[in-house]
Image: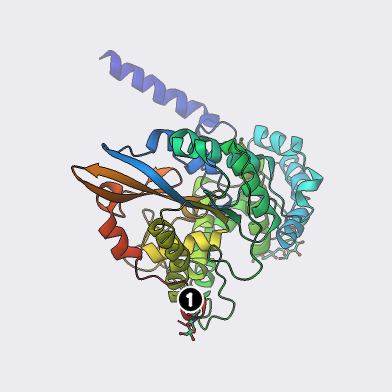
Amino acid sequence: MLKIILSGLFLLVCAINPTLSIYCFWNTGCPYKFLSTETSYDSVRGDMRDSAVNLKGCEPISMWGIYRHGKRKPSIATSTQMKDALQIQNLISESYKKHHSSICAQDVENLLNWNMDNKFLDGKQDLTEEGMREMVGLGNRLKEAFPLLSDVRDGDYTFRPAKGPWIEESIKYFVKGLGKNIKIDGARHDSDVMAPNCEKRNEKYDDSEVNKFMGSSDYLKVKDRIQRRTGLEFNLSDANVSALYDLCRYTWTNKASPWCALFTTEDLQVLEYIEDLKLYYTNGYGLKSNEKVGRIPLADLYNAFMQAKEGKDVTNDATIDQIFTALGLFKDASPLTAAARSRDRKWRTSYISVFSANLVAVLNRCNKGPKEEYNVVFYFNEEPIATICEEGVCSWQEFENKLGSFTTNLTEACAV
Ligand SMILES: *[C@@H]1O[C@H](CO)[C@@H](O)[C@H](O)[C@H]1NC(C)=O
Ligand SMILES: *[C@@H]1O[C@H](CO)[C@@H](O)[C@H](O)[C@H]1NC(C)=O
Ligand SMILES: *[C@@H]1O[C@H](CO)[C@@H](O)[C@H](O)[C@H]1NC(C)=O
């Protein structure tokens, strides 16, 4: 009886206090953190110290890893659009004063108090401070999880970045996290097995699904909601929506960015899907050659483990996505299309292509009776990949069956 009265009272309070039902960004307990490639690594990572698989009678003897660089500043093209969109900060405040905006007072205040660090939009794609911290953290946790990394000496390991200053910086911070004075190789000037580049591929990027989705009611409703919520007097273009989305996700550091208050969770999910579609058709299953290109670094992994020699490399996102394609990971039963935005799809760039995304393979030597056996455990973003082999541990035979036939011939891979 008492229970019923209380719940009745509670409902009454909600009904007579309409402010309780208004959606405000600043006090939403759980803001939507999945911002495609600009997702914070911390939002999706595991922790190697907790997840490292310890197998009885086995010890890790070799490791191989490929890492996406840490969080970096936006490119010149993106920065220019974001700079133009900055004036919307004041326009929203004016619109709010005229009662044309339905954004919450506190969200408008937070947006007005927000200041852009000018250096952030100078178009130089340096690592951000958060990116540096991510990289140090990765090195740190890896060293704690795998004591074999404590005795590394020059010559035992290869650490090599792909081309790009933000990539070269990333590896420096990663090695700093390992707490060792380790020699880092220079980036290769020709094509690197870690960052194979199919400049001359025959296949063309197919943007038809992305374009179709941009005309879908899902997307048009997002635009309309932002238009109404902000009360802006000019009609928002697709470029404006994209610039605002970039402001939300690039300025999201440890704390949610006040720019994200312009979007509902549903808006962010729709915008995320656009990015998923784009990457599916550039780096993912949407191009057949990706599967072949992704085999190139995996052939290097296979060779490295064959020689039981350790290697570590930092790379860019195209390669990581292509490796997943080559391994058949995050593959949906049917291709991603504009018509079907499945909420439980496997292909999610917010997980797959985040800054600092990483794939690590550990070679274990096990003493089973008189015989020595080897197995390989794969980790993605510091969690074992359970789907790759049974319970995440590949026997040497399974490993060989999967990777043994891969070659490093780029011409052949791009010829699809
Ligand atoms: C909105 O987008 C148009 C092009 O689509 C651009 O010319 C304009 O500068 C943008 N406005 C803002 C405030 O970013
Ligand atoms: C915005 O778009 C609507 C409908 O498409 C149109 O009627 C209106 O004139 C446009 N407003 C401006 C300021 O361009
Ligand atoms: C790579 O493949 C192409 C085409 O099959 C072939 O012509 C070339 O000799 C191969 N290169 C190497 C280094 O094996």
Q: Is residue 379 above or below residue 14?
A: below
Residue at screen point 39% across, 54% down: 343
> Which of the two residues, 32 or 52, is positioned nearer the viewer here?
52
Residue at screen point 40% across, 33% down: 50
Q: Looking at the image, can residue 238 be seen?
A: yes
> Which of the two residues, 280 or 222, is positioned nearer the viewer here?
280
Q: Is residue 308 left or right of residue 215?
A: left
Q: Is residue 88 left or right of residue 372?
A: right
Badge 1 amino acid: Asn
Task: Please name the colour scheme applied to the rendered image.
Answer: rainbow
Residue at screen point 31% across, 55% down: 388
Q: Is residue 306 above or below residue 2?
A: below
Ligand 3 has an atom within 8 Å of the beta carbon of the residue at disc 1: yes
Question: Residue 113, image x and y in percent?
Answer: 75, 35
> Which of the two residues, 378 or 95, is positioned nearer the viewer here?
378
Question: Residue 397, image x and y in percent?
Answer: 26, 59
Q: Which residue is mark 1?
A: 409
Question: Residue 282, image x and y in percent?
Answer: 52, 69
The image quadrant where one finds the N terminus is top left
Q: Is residue 355 left or right of residue 290?
A: right
Residue found farthest to the top:
2
Q: Assign a secondary structure to mark 1.
A: loop
Q: Is residue 182 above or below residue 307?
A: above
Residue at screen point 38% across, 38% down: 52
Q: Looking at the image, can residue 237 be seen?
A: no
Q: In this figure, what is the number of numbered marks?
A: 1
Query: For residue 79, which quarter of the picture?
Result: bottom right
